[in-house]
Image (tube, rainbow, N blue to C red):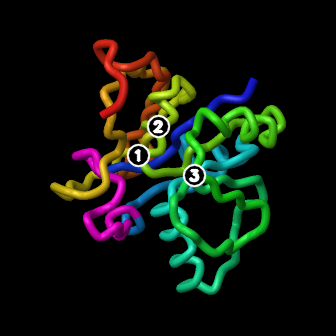
Amino acid sequence: MSRTVYYTASTLDGFLADEHDSLDWLLSQDIDEQGPMNYTDFEARIGALAMGATTYEWIRDHLAESGEGWSYAMPSWVFTHRDLPAVGERITFTSAPVAEVHAEMLAAAEGRDLWVVGGGDLAGQFADAGLLDEVVVSYAPVTLGAGRPLLPRRLDLRLVEHARNRAFLCGRYEVVGPRDGMMGP
């Protein structure tokens, strides 16, 4: 059965990126690429992607700097209200609410999981609609004090797995539901 999973890294104080959308804090951390909750094993379970415009633009800019091409073979949805150029195949741009396209994304995943790549607000939109099943976070030993929040919602989560991967504390959480019956931020 397909699950909708928000898999990401965060600073210890709960930020995905700094206030300039930089991930320099993440790219300098020590991690075992084959260690617990690693990206390669996670990505092998993925059949489709969902990401926000800021995440897509960061990936696009990073690809342009490195000279690499779009590395995702699976169907990808970019949630945006802007006109953005496609940098790869199988990319769908949408401004529809996540609840309206979730079934289409799951169908495209063909029984594999749907990865909510980022950002935190998009993952929150899936949670608001009751469509987010898991949150997997690798916490880095860094604080930023400000930036893009990990998940700007009030949610109850249940820890189902934890591990250490070199510098990172990793946790996999099941989404129980909105905190105190409240939806949204």
Q: Earlier in the sequence, mark 1 or mark 3?
A: 3
Q: Nearer the viewer, residue 42 or 89?
A: 89
Instruction: Look at the image and say whether residue 14 sits in the magenta stretch.
Output: yes
**Which residue does the image show at 30% across and 48% down from the upper left?**
149
Q: Earlier in the sequence, mark 2 or mark 3?
A: 3
* Left or right, residue 7 beside residue 147: right
171 w.r.t. 89: above or below: above
Q: Nearer the viewer, residue 32 or 182?
A: 182
Q: Nearer the viewer, residue 43 or 41?
A: 43
102 w.r.t. 130: above or below: below
The nearer-to-camera label among 1 and 2 is 2
The residue identified by callout 1 is: 120
**Residue 135 at x, y percent in the picture:** 48, 33
Contact between marks 1 and 2 (CB within 8 A): the answer is no
Task: Check disc 3: other Cα within 10 Å, few if <14, some if 14-19, many if 20+.
Answer: few
Task: Provide the secondary structure element on which disc 1 rests.
Answer: helix
Disc 2 to disc 3, C-alpha distance: 13 Å
**Residue 148 at x, y percent in the picture:** 31, 55
Image disc number at residue 166: none
**Outermost residue, right direction?**
110
Contact between marks 2 and 3 (CB within 8 A): the answer is no
The residue identified by callout 3 is: 95
The residue identified by callout 2 is: 125
Indicate the amino acid at tag 3.
Answer: Ser
* Left or right, residue 111 beside residue 52: right
> Which quadrant of the view contains residue 150?
top left
Disc 1 to disc 3, C-alpha distance: 17 Å
The nearer-to-camera label among 2 and 3 is 3
Residue range corresponding to the magenta coloring? 11-26
Disc 1 to disc 2, C-alpha distance: 9 Å
* Left or right, residue 103 beside residue 159: right
